[in-house]
Amino acid sequence: MSADQKVEQATSLLNRVRAEIAKVIVGQQDAVDGVLICLLAGGHVLLEGVPGLGKTTLLRTLARVLHLRYSRIQFTPDLMPADIVGSMIMESDERGLKMLRFQPGPIFANLVLADEINRATPKTQSALLEAMQERTVTSGTTTHELEPPFLVMATQNPIEMEGTYPLPEAQLDRFLMKIVVSYPSRTELMQILERTIQKEEADLDRIIDRPMILELRSICRGVMVAQHVQDFAVDLVMSTQPGHPQAHEMANKYIRYGSSPRGAQALLECGRVLALMRGRFHLSADDVRHVATSVLRHRIILNFDAHAGGQTPETVLHEIIESVAAARTR
């Protein structure tokens, strides 16, 4: 199969997946595309938004359309690491001999929803670190591999911050994207109400399965990256690092810590999937620009002046991204 045929087939499949999800999820196209991008790029996604915007429904719908194993973990202050990764249990065989056996936890799935992740203690949050980064779970002296594809979609509520534990920077950096889920428009809200009135649940088709997802991943890794696009990604990341000779004035003024090299890697990984979604086998600067805010918003830490001046990661990044993009077109 030629490269053009691969692109055409991949784009067609992804468009069908998006159309199938749209039978349940109204609007929220950025969130839908972001989750698909992270799944195919081999990363994880953090969704932030007030309750009732369909974050949980999105992942459950995705699992049905993609025919993948799905599990949901409700994070609470009393949740323990063993409740996530699993634990050793005592069993007796037919002769009465006792032995220890590992009982896998809900982390052993293809799509894992970590609901309200900031409500659990740091000890429990850290139980996800190995699984997210290494795709393994260690119990005693045994390491268990997690079956690919493996995606953690964590949600957090920006309100009701009492009794919550903000995610540490080390764990935030392990999310490929952070997507802010916004309120629906009036038209979208009317569509949601119309679907609520309907008695029948949407009948979803299974578009692709696990082997096909892994094949799509390999196609995404083959998307070509030109040197000037790579330079653009590097310029974006370095512009967020205060004190660097290439730092943007907004970074020197409002950012305490800029993006790590992992941010540059994420820009290219996410951009390549987006390029394939758009029907191309090469990455463009516009693809990188499109994913930049979602990739970098959780990788920068603002200083006191930014908070005092009413700045947010989005406002700071908007200025930096537009400035770097404009400088490259001169």
Image (spheres, rainbow, N blue to C red):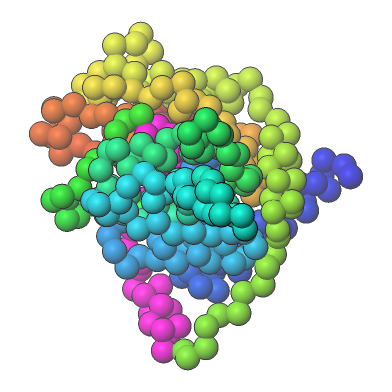
Which is nearer the eye, 241 or 89?
89
* Whether residue 211 is situated above or below residue 329 in the rendered picture: below
- Residue for point 48% across, 50% down: 90
Image position, residue 278 (x, y; %): 64, 48
Image position, residue 224 (x, y; %): 70, 30
State left or right for residue 214 relative to residue 89. right
Magenta stretch in the rendered image:
171-197
Give the image quarter of residue 259: top left
Which is nearer the eye, 113 or 4?
113
Is residue 185 highlighted in magenta? Answer: yes
State left or right for residue 25 relative to residue 12. left
Residue 235 in sight here: yes
Image position, residue 189 (x, y; %): 36, 75
Residue 35 in sight here: no
- Residue for point 52% across, 48% down: 98
- Residue for point 17% across, 31% down: 306
Tell me the quadrant of the picture where the N terminus can be found: top right
Give the image quarter of residue 50: bottom left
Which is nearer the eye, 170 or 316?
170
